[in-house]
Image: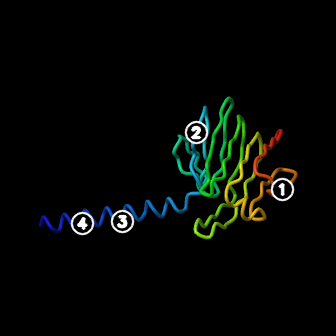
Amino acid sequence: MKARVHRTFWIGVIMFLSVSLAFAEDAAGMLKSVKGEVSIVRNGAVIPTAAGMKLMPADKIISGPDSAVGITLQDGTLLSFGAKSVSQLNAFRYDPVKQEGNMLISVLKGSMRFVTGLLGKTHPDSVAIRLPAATIGIRGTDFIVSVEGGE
């Protein structure tokens, strides 16, 4: 009986770790800093945020007045969103072994600072920032975008 309980315990641990690793691989990045009211809209649900939270592809990031959020993506890209910003990580895929993938970020309202990670440095054509009136192809390594009005 004791051996069966022990085996069941370890099977549970292995299953939990497998699911955790699969989730971690699907995550596009992590919220490194959160100031004020910042929320994520994921699959239609509004989720309050905290530093250390995973950011998933297709997440919409919304910051309130006097708020800001700093994000690090898997490839080392750094994103900072200022107060009253609305943006979405439309697509993110990164293979750390081949150092390739793609990224599309929409800035619908507010401000964003973008510091290029490995994708932008090694495959700049695979990284784009979509704005209400234009799309920015990444050629530089550090820039700020501001969108007035918007959503």
Residue at which label 4 appears: 8
Residue 121 placement, left or right of 15: right
Q: Earlier in the sequence, mark 4 or mark 2?
A: 4
Query: Where residue 75 sits in the image (x, y, percent)?
Result: 62, 58
Query: Where residue 115 sits in the image (x, y, percent)?
Result: 71, 48
Q: Earlier in the sequence, mark 2 or mark 3?
A: 3
Q: CA distance from mark 3 to mark 4?
A: 11 Å
Task: Tell me the element at label 3.
Answer: helix
Residue most extreme to the bottom: 98
Mark 3 crowdedness (10 Å alpha carbons): few <14, some 14-19, many ≥20 = few
Residue at which label 1 appears: 135
Q: Earlier in the sequence, mark 2 or mark 1?
A: 2
Residue at which label 2 appears: 33
Q: Earlier in the sequence, mark 4 or mark 1?
A: 4
Query: Cβ–Cβ below 8 Å for labels 2 and 1?
Result: no
Q: Nearer the viewer, residue 89 or 30?
A: 30
Q: CA distance from mark 4 to mark 1?
A: 53 Å
Mark 1 crowdedness (10 Å alpha carbons): few <14, some 14-19, many ≥20 = some
Please state which of the two labelled residues, at mark 4 or mark 1, is closer to the viewer: 1
For residue 15, the mark is 3
Residue positioned 70% across, 64% down in the render: 102
Q: CA distance from mark 3 to mark 1?
A: 42 Å
Query: The residue under label 1 is which amino acid type?
Result: Thr
Q: CA distance from mark 2 to mark 1?
A: 27 Å
Mark 4 crowdedness (10 Å alpha carbons): few <14, some 14-19, many ≥20 = few
Query: The residue under label 2 is which amino acid type?
Result: Ser
Task: Tell me the element at label 1.
Answer: strand
Task: Tell me the element at label 4.
Answer: helix
Please state which of the two labelled residues, at mark 2 or mark 1, is closer to the viewer: 2
Query: Where residue 59 sits in the image (x, y, percent)?
Result: 63, 53
Residue most extreme to the left: 1
Residue 129 placement, left or right of 18: right
